[in-house]
Image (tube, rainbow, N blue to C red):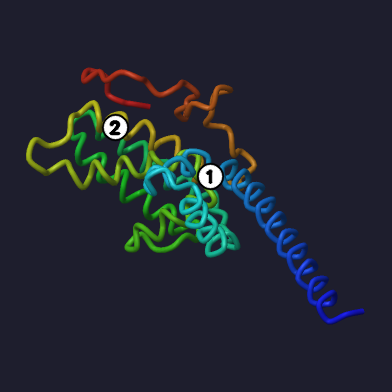
Amino acid sequence: MSTGLIIALIVIAAVVVAAAVMLTLRARGGHGGRNLKQRFGPEYDRAVARHDGDTKAAERELAERVERYGGLRERPLEPAERERFEARWTAAQEHFVEEPRQAVSEADLLLMELAGARGFPDGGRYEEQVDALSVHHAAHLDGYRRVHSGTATADTAGGTDTEDLRMAMVEARAFFDDLVTAGAESGHRHRRSDGAPRNRGGSPLPLTSHRARPKES
């Protein structure tokens, strides 16, 4: 066998191997993308938008979150802890009628502490905490973001509309329910069959604001 033929065979083999590797990587990338989209839900779309539509960059970011926080083991709440958090949330909702901005601040602090109690990064590192939460509780995470954003903007020029704050509280309640009941035997006792949060008496949270009513939940 001539030297030229041997070289040609080596080149052909190298091309075949490279093509196989590329096909494998593409297959894994597509599968990984589908898995990430399924796992992160609205967080996936949020990441894509933040990267100006670059899905590859968004998927790299989300994959890094999974690698960093996927192994995090959530600490289950003791029944007494859960009751204290639920009582504090009820108090914040009641407070909303008279002091909506203060109630949103209370909700923000409560969610921060609840996440820490479940084993997520300390609330003093908000962005890191949210990244970790997105890996395990992505479905309703925007509720946490909304009360945190409402707290940050309530005192700016023009303030924040009370209806916006109320909707932030409603969405945050869904996240609260998800986080406080995760891992508990009664994990869905606060939810209607359509996924909307219920109050402790079983009725859904109102979708309109009525100042005359003493409670939101």
Q: Mark 2 is on which residue type?
A: Glu
Residue 88 falls in image quadrant: top left
Write the residue at 34% across / 58% down: 126
Q: Which residue is mark 1?
A: 40
- Specify whether 97 is left or right of 83: left
Write the residue at 41% across / 36% down: 173
Q: Which residue is mark 2?
A: 94
Identity of the residue furthest to the left in this view: 157
Measured Cα–Cα span from mark 1 to mark 2: 32 Å
Write the residue at 84% across / 74% down: 5
Please state, as top left, top right, bottom left or bottom right, where the C terminus lies in the image: top left
- Specify whether 186 is left or right of 208: right
Q: Position of residue 81 (x, y in %)?
A: 48, 52
Report crowding for label 2: few under 14, some 14 to 19, many 20 or more residues within 10 A (C-alpha). Answer: some
Please state, as top left, top right, bottom left or bottom right, where the N terminus lies in the image: bottom right
Disc number placed over residue 61 in the picture, else none: none
Q: Mark 1 vs mark 2: which is more N-terminal? A: 1
Residue 192 falls in image quadrant: top right
Q: Of 15 and 157, which appears nearest the observer?
A: 15
Look at the numbered disc 2 and give the secondary structure of its residue. Answer: helix
Look at the numbered disc 1 and give the secondary structure of its residue. Answer: helix
Q: Position of residue 28 (x, y in %)?
A: 68, 53
Q: Position of residue 57 (x, y in %)?
A: 46, 54
